[in-house]
Image (cartoon, coloured by chain):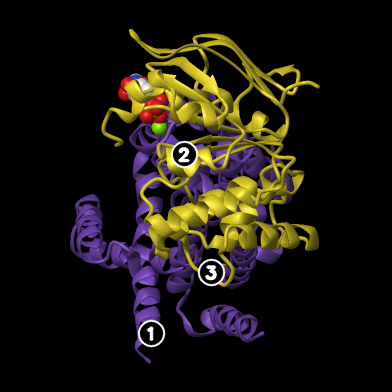
Chain colours: A purple, B yellow
Amino acid sequence: MKRQLAWLLVLLAAAALPLLLSSYHVDLATRILIFAVLAMSIDVLAGFVGRTSLCHGAIFGVATYVVIWASAKAGWAALPAMAAGVLAATLVAALFGVLAVRTRGVYFLLLTVALGMVVWGVCLRWTTVTGGENGLRGQDMRPALLVARENFYWLVLAVAALCSWGMWRFVNSPFGLSLRGIRDSESRMRALGYNVPLHLFVGFAVSGFFAGVAGAMYAFFNEYVSPTSVAMAQSVAGLLMAIVGGVGTLFGSFIGAAAIILLENTVSWYTDRWQSVLGLVFIFTMIFAPEGILGGLRRLAASKGRTR
Amino acid sequence: MQPALALQDVVVAFGALRAVGGVSLTVPKGQRRAIIGPNGAGKTTLFHAISGVVQPTSGKVIFEDADITALPPHRRARRGMGRTFQITNLFPTLTVRQNLFLALRGVSPGKFNLFGHARPTAEEQQRSAAALSLARLEGREDIAVANLSYGEQRQVELALAIANQPRLLLLDEPAAGLSPSERAMVAEVIRALPREITVILIEHDMDLVLGLVDHVTCLHEGMVLVEAPPEGIRGNAAVQEVYLGRPRH
Ligand SMILES: Nc1ncnc2c1ncn2[C@@H]1O[C@H](COP(=O)(O)OP(=O)(O)O)[C@@H](O)[C@H]1O
Ligand SMILES: [Mg+2]
């Protein structure tokens, strides 16, 4: 009960933001929410299955491409375009899942890098559909009601809240527990009757679905997509947000996304070497706060609770 | 009566090394069988072949009249085979309760519940409580397995394997690394298992084994050296030579 109330307050506070912020900052907050969903989808695998993915940026980007293509080239309405984007991302994730489930550790990581490269290459070369380097631009993609940036922010907030709830339920479900079991010991899981690759496959597809939702929202937010959106840097940024927030905390992704995006926003006033700054952030996090911000806070709270 | 388990000339080779070099065994239903033998005799590898962790290079594994040689481990578990590991193999970040929950769901379709709560049903609760009580872990349910003592972790090993009441239970040195009093306790736990469960027990310590089982197989260099009831083992010259004459660990 107390917990539900706390979440309600957080949600209300987030909903009140557009009343206080400039329109520029509302866009920034919208971007944070979208990328928090991407980071959470990565955390579902990294934190609860022990599989670090570097292709979620590509899965995210597939949804963005498909939504903008369906809207701008095929003239679909917003809702079907969104559904098509999420479906495409989920299918791509399922395909990647089939290939990746039998690997782990550094092999899993490298395989996801390679798969992400394939998507990037396709987006770059299949110019008739993707526009190649120029990318795809959508126009007036949002329904009339969502043109105002406040309204769009509220929609994204609602979707992000739903996705968070969904992923939280997922990792805490019997199935989610089986994924944590696989993280801890695959051989024991097999001895107990679990078809480990099947569980990994489903986990990967579900995670990809949520990355796809984030990518579809990004399509309506940005109304433009280019190969940069499916590039490795996108995957790295998403993973970094999950790490800065705290791997395995799920909701830490909101903190991580906010930290990274606000930092990027500040840094870009002074330098255009954002990638180098991102690299430094990664190094500092690994050295000084390997549990991430939320992970560290939780540990502090736990040790306080013990001394009391 | 059909046997619980039959091995027909099972060979497991790792390159040139024949860890199991053609073992044939028949274990009747409800029997308690010990597999003894010095370190490196191939006992664990034989268990891996029975539970599906490794594929035999040749030979057949028959479980209750069905040829399961080609089945993956999870399918064997669903058919009613449970096992423990010589080297503790648990879910350290999860609580004892969650470890048990995973064991119980492993053989039921309830493991595919994607968004529901990970709460045991009344029946699962009861099975979990029974396994915990048999393994003497009452009161430890909410502790993360990583925070248990080594001895308690060995008890969780047993609890996970017996939670589903398998018809064939494979115990790989369940008392490995325990103190004498803990070993006696593990012996009690095994003794208290329902009689209808067929148990195959790998154990180094003869004194522990001989009072627990109906029949003993002694392995040596991947081959069956002697097969006899416990009374026939202690005095057996061949067993003494390969086994008792050597350092125990
Ligand atoms: N995966 C493996 N690869 C290569 N050799 C192995 C492997 N597993 C076991 N062995 C070897 O097989 C032999 C039997 O090992 P094992 O079955 O563990 O013996 P035991 O359990 O009787 O002590 C040993 O010589 C061991 O080194
Ligand atoms: Mg062994």
Image coords of residue B225 (percent x, y): 45, 16
Q: Quadrant of residue B230?
A: top right
Q: Nearer the viewer, mark 2 or mark 3?
A: 3
When the figure is inspected, residue A84 is found, relative to residue A284, above or below; the finding is above
- Can residue B85 be seen in this snapshot? yes
Q: Residues within 10 Å of mark 2 (few under 14, many from 20)?
A: many
Label 3: chain?
A: B
When the figure is inspected, residue B122 is found, relative to residue A211, above or below; the finding is below
Q: Quadrant of ligand 1?
A: top left
Q: Compute the Cα span from label 1 to label 3.
A: 19 Å
Mark 1 residue CB less than 8 A from any atom of ligand 2: no
Which of pointers 2 and 1 lies earlier in the amino acid sequence?
2
Residue highlighted by disc 2 = A58
Q: Residues within 10 Å of mark 3 (few under 14, many from 20)?
A: some
When the figure is inspected, residue A169 is found, relative to residue B142, above or below; the finding is above
- Kind of residue at disc 3: Arg
Q: Compute the Cα span from label 2 to label 1.
A: 43 Å
Q: Quadrant of residue A150?
A: bottom right
Label 1: chain?
A: A
Dot 2 lies on which element? helix
The residue depicted at 41 percent of the width and 40 percent of the height is B205
Residue highlighted by disc 1 = A306
Q: Nearer the viewer, residue B114 or A215?
A: B114
Residue highlighted by disc 3 = B140
Q: Nearer the viewer, mark 2 or mark 1?
A: 1
Q: Quadrant of residue B122?
A: bottom right
Q: Compute the Cα span from label 2 to label 3.
A: 45 Å
- Say whether residue A250 is left or right of residue A162: left
- Kind of residue at disc 2: Ala
Q: Nearer the viewer, residue A266 or B235?
A: B235
Q: Nearer the viewer, residue B149 or A60?
A: B149
Image coords of residue A46 (percent x, y): 44, 50
